[in-house]
Amino acid sequence: MKILSDLVDGYFPSVLKGKYPDGVFLEVRDRTNEQYDASGENNGERISTFGSQKNDEFKPQSAEEFLNKLPKNVIKNGKVVKIRD
């Protein structure tokens, strides 16, 4: 569960650094209410593993594209922090 621990702490999982030194696209989904299907099929959706992804599927994005995915503001220690600035 080291991967989950690293993700929760906001870090790139250390166990993936050797194989993916430049990082890897992660899509986190809460599937705690779903029953695990060992065949790799779940509700008609194929579950991907790190080895099943093609490198060209995840293209780099511009800083503007990345920033537009973030919230404009967050509240930290009772203060409004402008994330995109």
Image (tube, grey):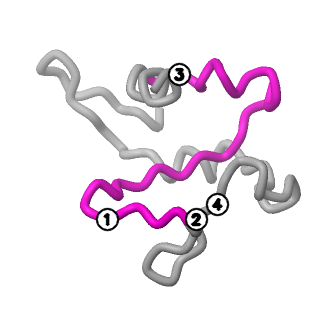
SS category of the residue bearing label 1: loop
Picture coordinates of residue 47, whole percent (x, y): 58, 65
Q: Around disc 2, counting alpha carbons within 10 Å, would you say few (fewer than 14), some (14 to 19), or many (20 or more)?
A: few
Residue at image position (49%, 21%) is 2
**Camera-nearest residue between 75 and 14:** 14
For residue 64, side relative to residue 19 (left or right): left
> Which residue is found at the position 41% from the left and 20% from the top?
9
Question: Label 3: few (<14), some or many (≥20) within 10 Å?
Answer: few
For badge 4, the amino acid type reads: Ser
Can you say whether 42 is above or below 12 in the image? below
Q: Which residue is mark 2?
A: 47
Dominant SS type (magenta): loop
Q: Nearer the viewer, mark 3 or mark 1?
A: 1
Residue 58 picture quarter: bottom right
Residue placed most toward the observer, 24 or 69: 24
Q: Please name the residue shown 66% across and 53% down the image.
A: 49
Q: Which mark is residue 11?
A: 3
Location of residue 53 by image quarter? bottom right
x and y percentages locating residue 3 in the rendered image: 52, 28
Q: Given the image, on which type of amino acid does mark 1 rest?
A: Glu
Q: Nearer the viewer, residue 42 or 14?
A: 42
Would residue 29 be counted in the magenta stretch? yes
Q: Secondary structure at mark 4?
A: loop
Q: Image quadrant for the N terminus?
A: top left
Q: Are marks 4 and 2 in contact (CB under 8 Å)?
A: yes
